[in-house]
Every structure is written in C-alpha cells, then in structure tokens.
Image: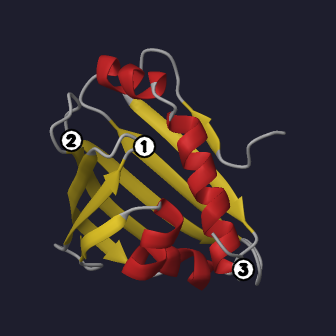
Amino acid sequence: MERKTKVHAEDGKQEIWITREFELPLESLFRAYEDPEIVSQWMGTHVLKLESKRHGSYQFETTDPMGNKHRFNGAIHEFVPNQKITRTFEMENAQFPVQLEFLQFESLTNTTSKLSIHMVYKSVEDRDRMLKLPFAQGISMAHDCLQKIMTGGVR
C-alpha cells in the first residue's frame, strides 16, 4: 500500500520535503497542530507545553517500547492560523542538532486540505542520518492517525 504522506529528499541537500493531502477542512488540519490534546493523541506523546503563538515554545515527551523517556522541544517563530507555522525542533540528549521546520497549510476544497513541511538541517550528513531512521514510516503513521482522530475515528 502506498503511503499518503510523501517524503522527498534530494541527494546532497540539507532538506526534507514532506507533503500530505487530508480529507479534512483546513481549519481541522490546523487545529490538529495547535491544540495540545489533539497533538497528544495523533503523535502518541505527552504534551508538556504547547504555546501555539508567535514566540511560543513547545515540549513533548514520549516513551519508547523499552520504557525510556525522550523529550522534544522547540521555539515557534511564526504562527499564522490556518496558514503557517515556522519552528525549530530539537531532540534532547540526541546526536542531532536543531532543525528548522516550515509548515504550510493549504485549503484544497471545503473538505480537503494539504500540509507541506520543509525541514532544514545543519548539514547534509545530519539530514542523511535522520533519513536512516524509520522517519518516513513514522510520519506517515502519525498523519494516518491524525486523519482518523480528526474524522471521529479512535486511536
């Protein structure tokens, strides 16, 4: 089965492009990224903080299958409801530097929308190390979950 979330990375570049079309109105898709309770559900993480605003910040904590806790955090630099979020992303105690993420939300019809994420890494090597993880599979599964939750499905 083909993944609905598309991940594209050109050789020799520090970027990853992610796109996904959702069977959701634009407002519902955006709310899934700004509401802490909804984020917690589709990401399968504990939201410690989510200040959905310009100059806000966030911190998430997840537990892996072996019981180890992992924290992720960042700063929100730009927040335009139903349009875009620009933020940093950092995995605490990991060998990855901070990355920059540009999220663009677009209405396709009254009932469909599109999310485009442009991620920029410090180096090509850092980006390539990220791609060696089950990154594409994970983001696709999370987006599938987001779709289900926002259309009334159960996680």
CA–CA distance in space, label 3 to label 1: 28 Å
The answer to whether residue 35 shows anywhere in this view is no
Depth order, front residue of 117/61: 61
CA–CA distance in space, label 1 to label 2: 25 Å
Q: Which residue is mark 1?
A: 65
Compared to residue 127, the image places residue 39 above or below, namely below
CA–CA distance in space, label 2 to label 3: 33 Å
Compared to residue 103, the image places residue 36 above or below, namely below
Q: Do residues under tags 1 and 2 come within 8 Å of each other at their CB atoms?
A: no
Q: Amino acid at mark 1?
A: Pro
Name which residue lies at 34% across and 20% down: 124
Name which residue lies at 47% across and 26% down: 131
Q: Which mark is nearer the camera, 3 or 1?
A: 1
Depth order, front residue of 79/59: 59
Q: Earlier in the sequence, mark 3 or mark 1?
A: 1
Q: Quadrant of the C terminus?
A: bottom right
Q: Which mark is residue 98?
A: 2
Name which residue lies at 42% across and 70% down: 40
Q: Earlier in the sequence, mark 2 or mark 3?
A: 2
Q: Which residue is mark 3?
A: 151
Residue 80 relative to residue 104: left or right: left
Q: Quadrant of residue 22?
A: bottom right
